[in-house]
Amino acid sequence: MAANFLDEFLPDLEEFREKTMKFHRGEITIPEYKGFSGGFGSYAQRGGRKHMLRLRMAGGQLTKERLSFVCDSIKKYHIDTVKLTTCQSIQFHNLEAEDLCILIEEAWKAGMISRGGGGDFPRNVMASPLSGVEIGENFDVLPYAQVMAEYLMQFIRAVKFPRKLKVGFSNSSKNEPHATFRDLGFMANEDGTFDVYAAGGLGNRPALGLKVADHIAPEKICYYAKAMVKTFVTYGNYENRGRARTRFMQETLGKDGFVRAYREQLDEVMAEEQLDIKITPCGIQKPGEPADLKYPRVIPQKQKGLYAVFYQPIGGMINPEKFFELQDAISDMEDVEIRLTPEEGMYIINCNAKEAQKILAVTDDGANTLFETSVACVGNAICQVGVRDSQEMLRICIDAVRKEQFADGVLPKVHFSGCPSSCSAHQTGTIGFRGAVKQTPEGPKPAFAIFIDGCDKMGQEKIAETGKSILTDDIPKFLVELGKMVAAENTVYEVWIKDNHEKLNALIEKYTA
């Protein structure tokens, strides 16, 4: 973290302490406190007595130094619940108010500033998790995400945004950070340039981003960010929070109108400011050990003889003790670091063959199938605005599916969101669920609305179609029956669904009737 930002933000902590204590004395309401505390990356949990703190780190880069801080904090504050998020951040949960105020300052001084981690601010800048090491990537986008993260910090105190602003960088068409439907996204091209997308987003009234620029020079990215800031504060809705995200400008201005407005702001920025950046390439010099590692969770890197190991804690809820195990395992491994994914998992990268096998053993408690890598938000047991407990729903479904012993891939990755906010990105999933209420002859009952056929791949982007609601008790039964249908044809869901949409729709109708 640049020292000037730290100096700028530290005085804000005194006000944070005062309002947090007032909240606990009942002098500030839950909505009033939420509107303030979110700007510090913290929210009160359901019930109002415990707190969450979100540590932002550009591109999900969890270095050994940051890992050490996480471990020290878990030990010092007896943190019992840690969540990996879909914005490549780490959340500490169940914090006492007194500990929270101290922990925030310690995190900031350790380089993981939480300012703007929530609220109406630029959020954690995302990047493809294997950027710089992935075979087939167009180029390494992580350095640009890091520069962008620093650049956007200057707007936290200087600009009042209508709502939050999410930015992502994708290194390939896999589009893991959803660059083509963020508020602002940069998609790497094979020729070393970026295409730029804007005014996209999930949640209520989702929208794919609009392409606002082709093949821009990477050193120009900050001009495009400043133009987005200016467009948002000029045309964003400050009156109605429900319509204050950038995607609603596609409606108020029209798609062509938004692109024109954005480019007008861009022309002004280009003419008036000097925002060019310079990136110094920093390659990995570590020697590799080519080996025939045939493990599903081991991914060869483009650096010959080096590997990344994938680890997915169920629902992103990682046992705090696991951080200590990882710290012990990688402490003497040269250049090894952790990259958080946009789907609540992590890669441990730059491992040689022996190191990869050691990491495999340390991380053998995670997901073992594609279905078990399913994504779930933290759920209403913790979140104040959650409608359903998505974490419990995922655990129940995994237990039911494991009993069937389906082959890997028979069921796809599923996304569970507790409410319409789409914190699990359920609108991008092949199958997604969103917390809901279903009206029955016996009255309203807990349910999840089903979404199908979402896709986040570049060139194939599609926001999932919203369906009817399935009772929570029936969702495990629905998934098991779906798995049996796919398994009966000796195939996997990705192949099966191409010719069987009618069967899927009939199954959905059975459980939503």
Image: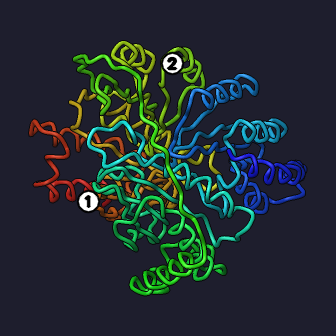
Local crowd at mark 2 within 10 Å, few (<14), some, or many (≥20)?
some
Q: Nearer the viewer, mark 1 or mark 2?
A: 2
**Residue 66: image x %, image y %?**
62, 32
**Residue 368 appears in the rendering:** yes
Residue located at (22% from left, 17% from top): 292
Amino acid on which disc 2 is placed: Ile
Determine if residue 23 is in view: no
Vertical comparison of 483 with 41: above or below: above
Q: Is residue 297 above or below residue 50?
A: above
Q: Dot 2: what SS?
A: helix
Front residue of 312/292: it is 292
The quadrant of the picture occupied by the C terminus is bottom left
At x 37%, y 54%, the residue is 470
Q: Residue 364 is drawn in which quadrant? A: top left
Count of numbered marks: 2
Drawn side of residue 329 relative to residue 26, left or right: left
Secondary structure at badge 1 equals helix
Under mark 1, the amino acid is: Glu
* Residue 509, numbered label: 1
Task: State the residue position of label 2.
Answer: 330
Across and down, in percent, residue 128 comes to: 41, 46
Q: CA distance from mark 1 to mark 2?
A: 49 Å
246 relative position to 360: left or right: right
Please tell me which residue is depicted at 22% across the width and 40% down the height of the picture: 483
Mark closest to the chain's N terminus, 1 or 2: 2
Q: Quadrant of the N terminus?
A: top right
